[in-house]
Amino acid sequence: MRSVSIIGIGCTKFGEHWEKSFRQLIAEAGIEAILSAGVEGKDIEALYGGSMASGRFIGQEHIGALIADQLGLNPIAATRVENACASGGTALRSGYMAIKSGEYDVVAVGGVEKMTDVGVEQAAIALGGAGDQETELFHGASFPALYALMARAHMTEFGTTEEQMAMCSVQAHKNGMLNPKSQFHREITVEDVMRSSYIASPLKLLDCSPITDGAAAVILCETEKAKKICEQPIEIIASTQASDTLALASRKSLTEMAATKKAALDAYKQAGIEAKDIDVVELHDCFSIANILAIEGLEFFKKGKGGKAVEEGKTALNSEIPVNPSGGLKCGHPVGATGIKQAVEITEQLMGKANKRQVKDAKIGMAHNVGGSGATAIVHILRKA
Amino acid sequence: MTDGALPLIWRKFGERYDLDGNFCETCKTAYFPARTVCPKCRRKGKLVAQKMPKNGKIVSFTEVFSGPAGFENEVPYFIAIIELENKTKLLSQIVDSEKEKVKIGAKVEKVFRKISDIDPEGPIAYGYKFKIVE
């Protein structure tokens, strides 16, 4: 059976890039990835680019060919993939499957979003499209509102507190301090989160991920070939994906992400490991409650115990299960780029090149990318080839 | 929202004005909005039109302070997941209710309201909202 490895990575700084355009961002990340892979442009056979709402944000669709063009890779096959906030993870999985199938040996995958070229209300509309337009966004349900509904349900069912959710943000910002590419470099306290203004109660400003510009890219290669051209390939030992109803109201439970659970269980089975074998995870914490739902869905903690686990520091750097050493989505969430950035971070962790945020002896890592309020979930498990 | 597109609003009159949904006679499950195929029974399902009950209770809620375009002037407003009397769940705004009474378990009933008018020259979108009943 063919196996797929990551041989090159690239990522821009996350933040408000007034001086850079969409195409410049993805070109910057893509070139960095190609150079670090030790391959040349002519070796790359296909490209998958993830972007959630480039049409809404900058009026640009058809970005597959655009990225290939900007990287000087025409005439290779270039395709855009879109799966809301999981567009990046889906691009990665598309590249993985293209190599796994035997069609290609070397594939470039990237993710990019340029979100600050529109106002906040327009950005809210663009992001709201990840939910159900007809039964949610139409009624004024912003994206924070959907996660707020899950948060309130989790608080009611399990006694999760606003302070426990605040701790998720505190830890994320603490880790983000160690990541030079993070959008923010400021430690915050639980009081800071509790005092920040409500966006959609019980979620406050500092419970939410920011509006961000950024791009990330990785170069994938068939593993046997990768071992010949790369000093330390990082093998993808599981790649899984699951879906759920688009509308939150149609789900069986508001306090469990069924797609995350399904993708995670499939991934553990595919990799032949259990949750306790994961040394480091980059998970999808678009809102603080999403962090709690994810650590439960990925089976690091029992359902309903996530808030307590975060409060007890069990998800901090070099703890029981180090969550989001990069700072996660609180260090910036350029939606289409996030899934790829997670894979970049896990690759650096497994290579031992994560500097101050390095998780000790990280051997197996996971990237978990969610689309919308949980209708798409993608899980990748990585280890040294 | 809809960028003022009339057909997008007009096509939905049935499910926005009257809670028109449907019911699978095979597995006895009600759906709102109506589905083209029953996701449980698929080809074995038999779907018939059914109006949803207008009463239900709040399952979860949030007060929105930062709304998307078209709702900037509405904030703060309540959004809730409501479980109707036939167990079907839907998302809606809670209006005309005292703030302190918006809580999980509170009984609500459907009302007819303006939803938004994103484009001053475009059509106004109407539909259901819910209010607390004593």
Image: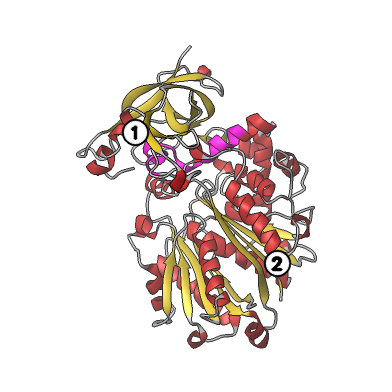
Which residue in the structure is indicated by mark 2?
A349
**Foreground pick, A301 / A73:** A301
Which residue is rendered at x = 47% and y = 16% of the image?
B98
Whether residue A89 is situated above or below residue A99 in the rendered picture? above
| Span shown in magenta | A133-153
* Residue to which mark 1 is pinned: B15
Residue shown at the point (55%, 22%) measured from the top left:
B103
For disc 1, the chain is: B
The amino acid sitting under disc 1 is Glu
* Residue A349 on image: x %, y %: 70, 67
Return the residue found at the far left: B121
Please state which of residues A12 and A4 is positioned toward the viewer in this rendering: A4
Of B67 and A378, which appears nearest the observer? Answer: A378
Q: Secondary structure at mark 2?
A: helix
Task: Examine the structure image and report whether residue A193 is included in the region drawn in magenta.
Answer: no
Element type at marker 1?
A: helix
Residue B21: percent from left, percent from top: 38, 33
